[in-house]
């Protein structure tokens, strides 16, 4: 099974011609499926652009949403409208509402948007303010403490959903691919070959999801988990455990690209097969 992975494609920054060029570059890879790890567009254009992309690539599209996908909307409204839209659109699957997807008899696909849950780094001392707080209805007009409560709740919601999906997946599958927008570990929060600093980490990593993934990898050393994520727009790969690998994708506004094109087998390299090895995962920067 051949898969193309793209992330942070921000299609709303492109004209029709630019989108056409991007979609044909995906078609040229002749994939059987396409994975998208969020920041696809913004709330008002999201459904239309997802539909256009699905029509153009001719293969099933599995996706999660990123923070930008909720801009000029609210989180619950966008999620709910996408859920209903995908129910009547064959080949378009929103993993945060679809449940687990079987890719092969040994490989399951799960996913959730995730959220920078304010737990890593130093939220209270950080001078960083994301546009999320002005452009997503859920955060507008709230004070910093209330926003932190919302960030944590969003991280917990993603973690709870993925916990259930992982429990399901690890009963029947040896390999799990998890799509999420926000890196689930600070070690996967790449910025120019380094880990994001304490000012950025509260918004760029989701500790709650990380804990769930780490626990699953510890409980089932015989199973392999590969996580694909984005959000930082800087690429890197890290093994948190021999059986838990996180790939973070790079991106540039207005210039979407194919992150990787791979056979499913390539997502689970031999180094992930060291059963029960207690080695400390090493960080390997890619770009
Ligand atoms: Fe992005
Ligand atoms: Fe993002």
Image: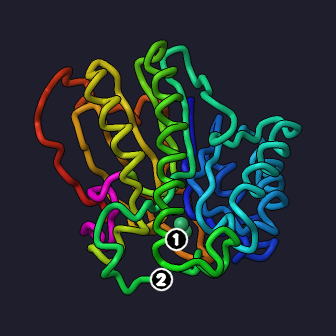
Residue 261 visible in the displayed image: no
Q: Where's the N terminus, which quadrant?
A: top right
The image shows residue 287 at horizontal and vertical percentages of: 32, 66
Q: Which residue is mark 2?
A: 129
Q: Residue at x 77, y 43 (%)?
A: 83
**Which mark identifies residue 147?**
1
Q: Residue at x 52, y 70 (%)?
A: 146
Residue 191 on the magenta segment: yes
Residue 261 on the magenta segment: no
Nearest to the observer: residue 214 or residue 226: 214
Looking at the image, residue 263 lies above or below residue 283: above
The image shows residue 122 at horizontal and vertical percentages of: 29, 72
Disc 1 and disc 2 in contact, CB within 8 angstroms = no
Q: Residue at x 78, y 57 (%)?
A: 77
The mark that comes first in sequence, 1 or 2, is 2
Magenta residue span? 185-196
């Amino acid at each position: 099974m051949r898969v193309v992975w793209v992330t942070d494609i921000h299609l709303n920054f492109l004209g029709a011609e630019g989108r056409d060029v991007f979609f044909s570059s995906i078609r040229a890879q002749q994939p059987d499926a396409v994975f998208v790890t969020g920041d696809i567009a913004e709330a008002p254009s999201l459904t239309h652009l997802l539909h256009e992309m699905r029509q153009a690539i001719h293969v099933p599209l599995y996706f999660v949403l990123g923070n930008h996908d909720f801009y000029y909307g609210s989180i619950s409204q966008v999620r709910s409208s996408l859920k209903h839209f995908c129910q009547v659109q064959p080949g378009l699957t929103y993993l945060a509402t679809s449940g687990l997807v079987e890719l092969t008899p040994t490989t399951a696909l799960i996913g959730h948007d995730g959220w920078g849950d304010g737990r890593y780094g130093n939220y209270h001392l950080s001078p960083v303010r994301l546009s999320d707080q002005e452009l997503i209805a859920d955060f507008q007009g709230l004070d910093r403490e209330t926003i932190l409560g919302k960030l944590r709740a969003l991280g917990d919601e993603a973690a709870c959903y993925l916990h259930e999906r992982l429990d399901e997946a690890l009963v029947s599958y040896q390999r799990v691919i998890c799509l999420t927008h926000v890196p689930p570990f600070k070690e996967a929060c790449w910025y120019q070959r380094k880990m994001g600093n304490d000012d950025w980490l509260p918004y760029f990593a989701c500790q709650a999801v990380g804990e769930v993934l780490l626990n699953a990898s510890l409980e089932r050393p015989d199973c392999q988990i590969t996580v694909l994520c984005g959000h930082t727009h800087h690429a890197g790969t890290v093994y948190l455990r021999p059986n838990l690998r996180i790939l973070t994708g790079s991106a540039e506004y207005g210039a979407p690209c194919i992150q990787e094109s791979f056979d499913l087998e390539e997502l689970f390299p031999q180094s992930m097969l060291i059963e029960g090895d207690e080695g400390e995962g090493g960080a390997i920067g890619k770009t």
